[in-house]
Amino acid sequence: MSRLDINIRRLEAQRACLNRVAEEIRDLPGPVLELGLGNGRTYDHLRELLPEREIFVFEREVAAHPDCIPDERHLYRGDFHDTLPAAAARFAGQVALVHADIGSANPERDARLAAFVAGHLPALLRPGGIVASDRDVGFAGARPLALPEDLAPGVYHLYRRPLV
């Protein structure tokens, strides 16, 4: 599969998963966290899907399209290792959705970052909260959710924090 086809498959999976989880959290209160702004495409999509939600974005170096950059109140600038622990304290048990687009071309780095992120998810998520991620960020007690139809296993990951 060409790198173009791989990227298209990833973006289609990302969109399908975000569309699904937006419906899943429709009646679940709480903010949304976007881990990794990149070009701002998924942040923009989340704003469209969930216009009534506060969306907080985490990004080391902001380089997104100007229309896709949140205001400073909703932007955590810096390394996840510095910003995520502070967010866990601020949003303890309140977050309805975490979208983590944290992958790179370095599998070892990705595995370390996914483990770090997974370690903070239980403290962030409210009961019933959902995680959608391009990397496996399964955490203790997480319940995997089925992917939308036609998505290959492993192309995206969905988890829910149990209600109890």
Image (cartoon, rainbow, N blue to C red):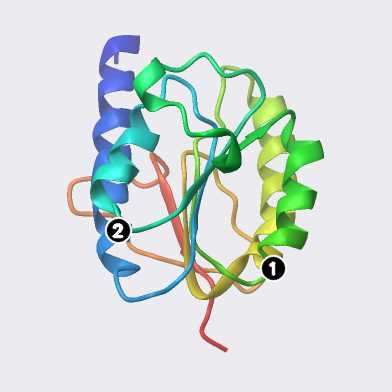
In the displayed structure, 149 sits above or below 4; it is: below
Q: Position of residue 57 (x, y in %)?
A: 54, 39
Give the mark toward the camera: 1 or 2: 1
Residue 70 seen by the camera: yes
Q: Nearer the viewer, residue 164 or 83?
A: 83
Which image quadrant is residue 14 in? top left
Q: Which mark is residue 54?
A: none
Residue 92, label in figure: 1
Secondary element at image label 1:
loop
Q: Is residue 159 rendered to the left or right of residue 73?
A: left
Determine crowd level at label 2: few under 14, some 14-19, many 20+ residues with C-alpha closer than 10 A: some
Q: In x, y percent, where is residue 164?
A: 57, 89
The quarter of the image holding the N terminus is top left
| Residue at the far left in the pictured view | 150
Please give the name of the residue rendered at 67% of the width and 67% of the height, measured from the top-left corner.
Answer: 122
Q: Amino acid at mark 1?
A: Ala
Residue pointed to by mark 2: 22
Q: Please indicate, yes or no, whether residue 2 appears anywhere in the rendered image.
A: no
In this view, the residue in front, 150 or 122, is 122
Residue in the image at 47% along x and 33% along y: 70
